[in-house]
Amino acid sequence: MNNYTLLKGFVDRILALMLLVIILPFLLSIAVVIRIKMGKPIFFIQKRTGFKGSPFQLYKFRSMINLYDSNNNLLPDELRLCSFGIWIRSYSIDELPTLINVLKGDISFVGPRPLRHEYCSLYSKEQFLRLSVKPGITGLAQISGRNMISWEKKFEYDIQYFHNQSFLLDLKILFITFIKVFRPEGINNKSKSYTDPFKGSK
């Protein structure tokens, strides 16, 4: 690791701890509403891929209710996403528990988004470069279209970040992310589920 990476990791943890302390009452309030409106569990926990391909458990607030078909299979996302779930997604409130992952050192504030661990075997040699940097809560792809751009375009942005990462670039990404949180765009709504699963590039 270079000096910037070490400093970034240290600053990430300090900021994550400070933010968690400051917003703890808000987090507890959201947790209570989720419990009332959607039941248990409160958190959505999923295996994701971290730095150099190491797996970890990512924490988010749950945004969908549990609805099953006659065969006991979960219904499609768009049928399980309630109005409160849409609201917390629109303002990225569901992402706040990932501060725990930042505090643990699993992810950074800025970097390629951590994706499902099973996607690793589908990456091309070039796409695998996205794992050469610690993943982040936000990144170039998130400020450039979020769910509205293709997987291939997202990976292009991730690789671009890998080659050009710097303190100034991180500040730029954080600033634009902050603006976009209050002007939600490129986010899934009730009529559309999350981005289709990645099945490999053609």
Image (tube, grey):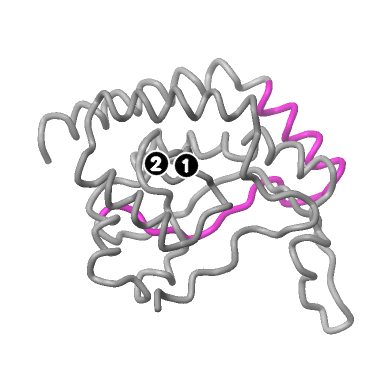
Quarter assignment of residue 83: top right
Which mark identifies residue 140? 2
- Give the residue type at disc 2: Leu
Magenta stretch contains residue 54 = no
Q: Return the residue at label 1.
A: 144
User: Which residue is found at the position 47% from the left and 42% from the top?
Assistant: 144
Name above or below for residue 33 compared with residue 54: above
Name above or below for residue 115 compared with residue 1: below
Quick one: quadrant of the C terminus?
bottom left
Left or right of 39 on screen, residue 186:
left
Q: Could you tell me if the residues under marks 1 and 2 are in contact, i.e. CB atoms within 8 Å?
A: yes
Range covered by the magenta-colored residues: 26-51
Quarter assignment of residue 131: bottom left
Q: Residue 13: image x %, image y %? A: 35, 28
The outermost residue toward the bottom is 71
Magenta stretch contains residue 46 = yes
The outermost residue toward the left is 2
Left or right of 116 on screen, residue 28:
right
- Give the residue type at disc 1: Ser
Name above or below for residue 131 compared with residue 68: above
User: Which residue is found at the position 64% from the left and 28% from the top?
Assistant: 183
